[in-house]
Image (tube, grey):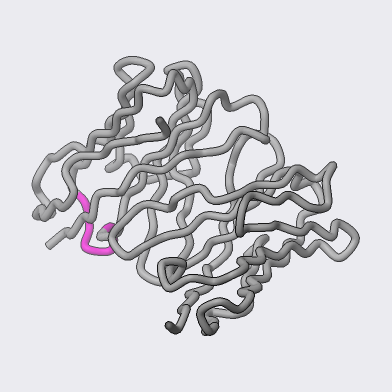
Amino acid sequence: DTEVTQTPKHLVMGMTNKKSLKCEQHMGHRAMYWYKQKAKKPPELMFVYSYEKLSINESVPSRFSPECPNSSLLNLHLHALQPEDSALYLCASSQAEAASTDTQYFGPGTRLTVL
Amino acid sequence: DQQVKQNSPSLSVQEGRISILNCDYTNSMFDYFLWYKKYPAEGPTFLISISSIKDKNEDGRFTVFLNKSAKHLSLHIVPSQPGDSAVYFCAASGGANNLFFGTGTRLTVIP
């Protein structure tokens, strides 16, 4: 089983709203990731959690706030977003972060539209 | 600066023939390479990978070739099937598990 689930599938929010994206995996993976993908562009890394601790933050604006409540769950809290933040947000997980040879498995993504 | 490049945005192949998707990279520290397949409105699906200690890895109809001296890898699909039609992303990593993706190649397999 290599399933990563994400909810919601689609989200439309205004610039003053607060919302959260959720990601879950039950593969026992200890590294989880958030990526952002704009249309016709490759996925770009936002955050990496390793053993429930934030290990990489790729200079993401503070209006995006990640949270890892436990080893299976990863949230992305959104507040005061801008229309240019509209994108597909992808969650991924891998066995462990330390080895670069760990394969990352992706969820289906949340399509976010900011009005 | 794009460290992983897929210079062909699209490729069309007849069913039953070979599909060859190419990828180039610039960072010699990359030591693990992956191919993902992506359908519209879905996340990337892992297809096949190769470590830098190998030059070929095969899994069924999919074979990945790595040429380290040329910093080039390719994905061969044979025989191609209509269900293979999707966008294929090449990705590379070199420690810290930060995956760098290419811009993707849209493969269309014509029945």
Question: Where in the figure is residue B30, as x and y percent of width and height?
Answer: 75, 47
In the rendered view, would you say A22 is above or below B106?
above
Residue occupying image coordinates x 71% and y 44%: B32
Asked whether A52 or B109 is in front, the reply is: B109
Residue occupying image coordinates x 81% and y 62%: B71
Give the prevailing secondary structure in the magenta stretch.
helix
Question: Where in the figure is residue B49, as x and y percent of width and height?
Answer: 65, 47
**Quarter where residue B16 is shown:** bottom right
Residue occupying image coordinates x 76% and y 55%: B27
Question: Where in the figure is residue B37, as x and y percent of width and height?
Answer: 47, 58
**Quarter where residue B20 is shown:** bottom right
Does the magenta run of residues contain A83?
Answer: yes
Number of marks in the rendered image: 0
Camera sees residue B96: yes
Q: Is residue A20 left or right of B82 when viewed as pictured?
A: left
Question: Where in the figure is residue A47, as x and y percent of width and height?
Answer: 44, 37
Which residues, given as a range, are shown in magenta? A81-85
